[in-house]
Image (cartoon, rainbow, N blue to C red):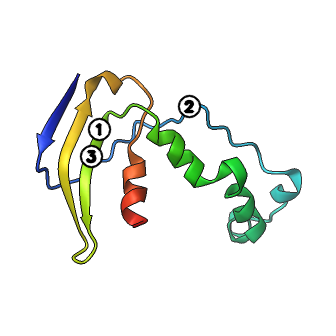
Amino acid sequence: GSTSQQKTKRCIISTNTGVDGIFYPPLPLKSRKFKDIAAFKSNEGVYEFLNSGNRSYGNLLDAIRKQDKLVSNKYEIKKKTFDIIIKQTDYDQDALDKKNTNIEEFFDVIDW
């Protein structure tokens, strides 16, 4: 079952990770020809490949939003003062043995 805490002042991020149904195909062979990891990371083509089509982090976050959550927060962002007010934290112990995360809350907060 679910329980709630009212007016919590900290945000809880659950990282029991795993996103079912998301598949990231391997990089094309031509993208693997780099002398070191720095060259790989700095290649614009690699960035474009990893963030295009069904590989974008937006699609990952959409898939995460559909999952049951161990911990989820209802919050308000006050842009003028850069405050985040946690209105409610829900804990669903039935999700404890499932792969899940609420990392999308982090991205929602930093993307406002």
Q: Position of residue 13 (x, y in %)?
A: 32, 47
Answer with left or right where residue 7 lies relative to residue 11.
left
Rendering quarter of residue 44: bottom right
Q: Residues within 10 Å of mark 2 (few under 14, many from 20)?
A: few
Q: Position of residue 78 (x, y in %)?
A: 24, 69
Q: CA distance from mark 1 to mark 2?
A: 18 Å
Q: Are marks 1 and 3 in contact (CB under 8 Å)?
A: yes
Q: Is residue 60 above or below residue 34?
A: above
Q: Which residue is labeled 3 in the image?
A: 73
Residue at the image point whose x is 13% and y is 40% from the top: 5
Q: Which residue is labeled 1 in the image?
A: 71
The amino acid sitting under disc 1 is Val
Q: Is residue 15 above or below residue 75?
A: above
Residue nearer the viewer, 46 or 79: 79
Give the SS element for disc 3. strand
Q: Which residue is labeled 2 in the image?
A: 20
Give the SS element for disc 2. loop
Residue nearer the viewer, 74 or 19: 74
Residue at the image point whose x is 61% and y is 32% from the top: 21
Q: Residues within 10 Å of mark 3 (few under 14, many from 20)?
A: many
The first of marks 1 and 2 along the sequence is 2
